[in-house]
Amino acid sequence: MNVWPALLRREFQEHKAGFFWTPLAILALVAVLGLFAVARGGTGDVSVFLRTETTVIENGQTRSSVEQREADSLIGLVDIARMSDAQLRHALARGRGLLSQPFVLAHFVIALFVLGGALYDERRDRSVLFFKSMPVGDAETVLSKLLFVVWVAPVISVAAIIAAQLLLLCYASIYLLLAGLAGAGQLWVQSGIGSGALELMVGLLVQGLWTLPLYAWLLLVSAAAPRLALVWAALIPLALVLSERIVAGTSWLKDWLSPHMTLAALPHPGQPSGMHPVPRWVSASSWRCS
Amino acid sequence: MSLIDARGLRKHYRGMRAGDVCALDGFDLTLEPGRILGLIGPNGSGKTTALKAFLGLTHLDGGDMRVLGLDPRRQRKALMTRTGYIADVGTLPRWMRVHQLLDYVAGVHPGFRRERAQAALSHTDVRPDSRIQGLSRGMTVQLHLALVLAVQADLLVLDEPTLGLDILYRQQFYDRLLSEFDGERQGILITTHEVREIEHLLTDVVFIHHGRAVLQAPMDDLAARFLRLGVGPGEAAAARALGPISERHSLNGIEMVFDGRARSELEPLGPVATPTLPELFVALLGENR
């Protein structure tokens, strides 16, 4: 009997608030803030991740700063018409990267809490006895939790991110059309939304692999900790890192651990220096393939 | 083939404060198809440890055990397709809704017949969209029993299933259990403190004390083997000469329980009756042990 659909559905139901309603709530926030930005005509202070696509700069001072700092800075909708394709593409890619961050960050934080509590909560409320009374192997149970958090739930986040991108592009197009400005068509042509979605998918797959040691560690602690699983999960490596420093004076463990606790593999335009070499290389080569 | 065949089970808990606790100390138990076995013992006697061992939920330090012909520890998944288990406290996941729980069991259990569970639940106040958290203890037990009975398991393991239920729910629970019982192939292993309530439905009984089976016998044998004698002070000495296994002072005089004495031997000394399970329990495991 294939128990996987039931196991994954169970995980979804248990963590619906975290992995379904949270991205939806962020999407709703983006929708509202985006509308707000467009309605105000935008002066750049509405929201960091909306700037590139929806901010309209109307006073001369800001406009000149755009010209000075080129595409990396504030770009208003009115500027789209006179931007080169390359500038527009770069600006939109940066916008996509910024827009995905609240979703990705929320998923990461929720994943830490969910995995840190997964097997602990079941022991605490004794529902582990019920789940163990079903013909499901321990390996299947544990893998289903890992698989769901690492590779199934992110699909929901990706869908929400793409929805947010489409929504903001719609806002911007409508604004341009209503204002009688050119560039709405070019906005969609250069949006990179398709390749961006692929980048995100591949990035999440790689990110899942890259963070797997951390996730697996959390799950292990949640299966064994007598209480306060997350505290144990943080204190044990911390104690090991400190003792290595005191005893050997080295930081080998810390150097190995810390890159795994980042979102390094995800598309992160604008700040490539934050990436660890390995996931950056894997992600970059996958993007090139795609 | 026996449903459960356990020989010499041993289990120690290494306690940090209380020192080592011996939960099972050479425990034996056999359950045949068509039997309803009551596992009866005081708190801390090893009942729950034994049940967990049969279900592969705990590691044993020694002994031989086959449940449905399987090794519970290594073949738990196969064992659980044919075994139902209700623990002493509500173990159904509290965050789930009833229909989600039915979906889940239907999705992982090849023997689960959903329409049976739904039919059983339609006679209760449990609604499909109720959250388990919001159900009363009695409703939770009804739900769990409906799930377990919809599986048609060969072996049912019930650990204090009616703990904390009022008399109506308890009666309903056992009525339903018995009405679904398949005397050809099914066996039930049950523990409870309400010994008197299940006495009439048991076919076998095991008394467990300090991790050992003090007594395993069919209920019919108990009636033939044990007798309770009420004696006045005058006959007490003569009765004691026959070797009672226990002696208890009551309002009506002294009550003694005898093991293996003929009714005709005791009748001249006073009124003779078959001891109830609780009386026998106290006689065998009472304060003098």
Image: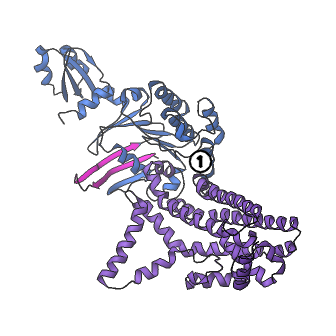
What colouring style does the render use?
A: by chain
Q: Position of residue B280 (x, y in %)?
A: 28, 29
Image quadrant occupied by the N terminus of chain A: bottom right
Of B248 and A79, the residue lying toward us: A79
Q: Residue at x 50, y 79 (%)?
A: A259
Q: Position of residue A39 (x, y in %)?
A: 77, 61
The foreground one among A98 and B173 is A98
Q: Is residue A270 depicted above or below A2 in this figure?
A: below
Chain with purple colouring: A
Magenta residue check for A207: no
Q: Is label 1 in a helix, a strand or a loop?
A: helix
Give the answer, above or below, for where B94 lies relative to A98.
above
Q: Measuring 43% from the left and 62% from the top, which residue is drawn there?
A: A230
Tell me the chief SS of the magenta region.
strand
Q: Residues within 10 Å of mark 1 (few under 14, many from 20)?
A: many
**With B18 as the anchor, is A218 left or right in this view?**
right
State the extent of the magenta-drawn residues as a range: B1-30
Q: Which chain is blue?
A: B
Which quadrant holds the C terminus of chain A? bottom right
Which residue is at a point 13% across and 24% down the rendered structure image? B240
Residue that carries the numbered disc 1 in the rendered image: B105
User: Residue A70: percent from the left, percent from the top?
Assistant: 72, 84
* Picture quadrant of residue A267: bottom right
Q: Where in the figure is residue A68, as x and y percent of width and height?
A: 71, 85
Residue type at numbered disc 1: Val
